[in-house]
Image: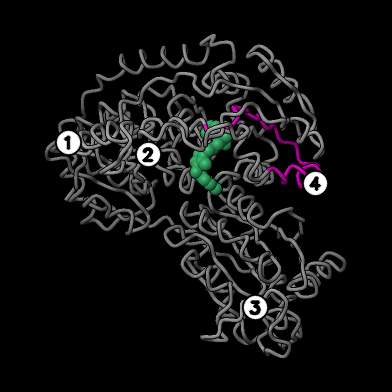
Amino acid sequence: MRLTVGQAVVRFLANQWTERDGAEQRTIAGCLGIFGHGNVAGIGQALLQAQRTGEADLPYRLARNEQAMVHTAAGYARMKNRLSTLACTASIGPGSTNMLTGAALATVNRLPVLLLPSDVFATRAASPVLQELEDPRGYDVSVNDAFRPLSRFFDRIWRPEQLPSALLAAMRVLTDPAETGAVTLCLPQDVQAEAYDFPDALFAKRVWHVARPLAEPAFVARAAEVIREARRPLIIAGGGAVYSEASAELDQFARETGIPVADTQAGKGALSWDHPQSVGGVGSTGTPVANRLAREADVIIGVGTRYSDFTTASRTAFQHPSVKFVNINVASFDAHKESAYPVVADARAGLSELLAALDGRRFPDDFRADVALWQETVGRAYHLGHGPLPAQSEVIGAVNEVCGTRDVVVQAAGSMPGDLQLLWRAGDPKQYHVEYGYSCMGFEIAGALGIKLADPSREVYALVGDGSYLMMAQEIVTAVAEGIKLILVLVQNHGFASIGALSESLGSQRFGTSYQFRGAGQDYDGGRLPVDLAVNAESLGAAVIRCRTIADLRDGLKRARDSDRLTVVHIETDPLSPVPSSESWWDVPVPEVSSLRSTRAARETYDAAKRDQRQYL
Ligand SMILES: Cc1ncc(C[n+]2csc(CCOP(=O)(O)OP(=O)(O)O)c2C)c(N)n1
Ligand SMILES: [Mg+2]
């Protein structure tokens, strides 16, 4: 079939399917993009031709920022449990390098996204092309080489003949739960337009089976022995438990063994918050109940977790002198973390195999009274009555109580991820969507767009800090243009509540974290800026509801829910409002020497906390 490389890419992608447990879906459900000279006549022409002729089904959506469109694809993929994603086409140079942050986010979170950056002329006929880097050390280097460390598969299609093997490798990596992440195929702008006789077979429907690898029996036997001999084990459910749809198996495992289940940011909701075995988040932003259990546990059973420093409280969470780890993980890399007894397997399959090998062993479930007490604390934080400005915990409570179990809350950075992990009551495995692998400010709105595209039947509430909003709010325009309804809760606290508090706790006096005029001294303490983000949102096409009190907010959220327009619910909160303690720690190094008293005092506290840090060998 004589096609250009661009046409071949589009036709191929439209015929890829993913299958798990017998259910098929499109591997690449569509293409997001922003055109420039690097792709307008290549992939751009191919997308147009596909749409006009029906030769291939790959719907195109115009994004407003390339970083954001990768976030949209990542949000989509996560919502689809990694079984389906979107492609992203960008022009050469800045259009492509704008996608780097998105690539890193996807790879860190183990989420499949297909990136198609445009690249310099393969023929070099017109070099240097507009926006070419020109590396004097080698003409085969371009800005797109920056994608290499961020991609789980990277290739550059210098010749049309290379395309079939590159496309197949891309699909293999995207659909492999252990390998997946950003996949980057760089497409030189001349090659995109070059024709070649591609074999018909390349464009036949192809179904990629997403495996549920079983654990090798010896893995299971060794892990089961460790658990059988435990006295107080604790399960940590991570993102893998959600992606493999292992909730029923996790429920059975926990009920039959009596082992409590804590969760990570990515794993929250794998068990409902009110499940009898749930003890909430663990680690730096976990619940005091889970953290107490973690401190005392002699065996930690990680299910689909990558053990970030937040999960391990920077390796201070697990204090039993001979604590051992058993990790069920589809990726050997993660299964072996913390010197664990690895169970390299799909989370769902691994849980069932391990449960069968435990021979009915049961453990004490004497933590429930503590969980009930903790839930009273959460209830108080939801209804704090803080003033004059409301507390963030009340905003979280209002959203939690207004939204339905199937609705989705989206967040990524600032003070909210911590408060959410501590306080949010997730009733469904897809309800809690906090991107905390890369914790990228600006993910929220773009990610919410992807989530809503993936499941239009759910209401999507993105909580957006003013800092995050100022970084990337432009996808409001994309959502408005596409007729996609989102609810954006804009939490205005005039700066970085998160880093402000962190700074203060580390002796750095909230330096440079407030959005105010530069004052007479050196810091930003010169008063309120004439900034109105509600007006800004309105100017981008959103309906806006301004709220002053939590009662207003609850009412505003209901109105937003009942509306069919993208709505921004704006509320100002107290950046210093209290939140219950996690009784945990996070390692952020404080200077060893300083002429500031505040830094010296913080260093003493730091040194004391650091003594609890362990290596798990
Ligand atoms: C892209 C990016 N830059 C910087 C950071 C570091 N950082 C983490 S939270 C934060 C402030 C977030 O401000 P805002 O969105 O207003 O949330 P708040 O802290 O006020 O809750 C910063 C700068 C980050 N996570 N992501
Ligand atoms: Mg803020």
Image depth: mark 3 or mark 1 in front:
1
Disc assigned to residue 482:
4
Asked whether residue 435 is in view, the answer is no
Against 41, residue 70 (above or below) is above
The answer to the question of whether label 4 and label 2 lie on touching residues, with beta carbons closer than 8 A, is no
What kind of residue is marked 3? Leu
Which comes sooner in the sequence, label 4 or label 1?
1
Q: Determine whether, in the image, residue 120 is placed left or right of residue 42.
A: left
Disc 4 to disc 1, C-alpha distance: 52 Å
Q: Which residue is mark 3?
A: 202
Classify mark 4: helix, strand or loop. helix
The stretch in magenta equals 473-496
Query: Which residue is located at x 52 percent, y 69 percent?
Result: 146
What kind of residue is marked 2? Ala
Which comes sooner in the sequence, label 3 or label 1?
3
Position in image of residue 346 (x %, y %): 39, 52
Disc 2 to disc 3, C-alpha distance: 40 Å
Query: Which residue is located at x 70 percent, y 54 percent?
Result: 65
Q: Which residue is mark 2?
A: 237
Q: Quadrant of the N terminus?
A: bottom right
Which comes sooner in the sequence, label 4 or label 2?
2
Q: Which residue is mark 1?
A: 298
What kind of residue is marked 4? Glu
Q: Quadrant of residue 268?
A: top left
Which comes sooner in the sequence, label 2 or label 1?
2
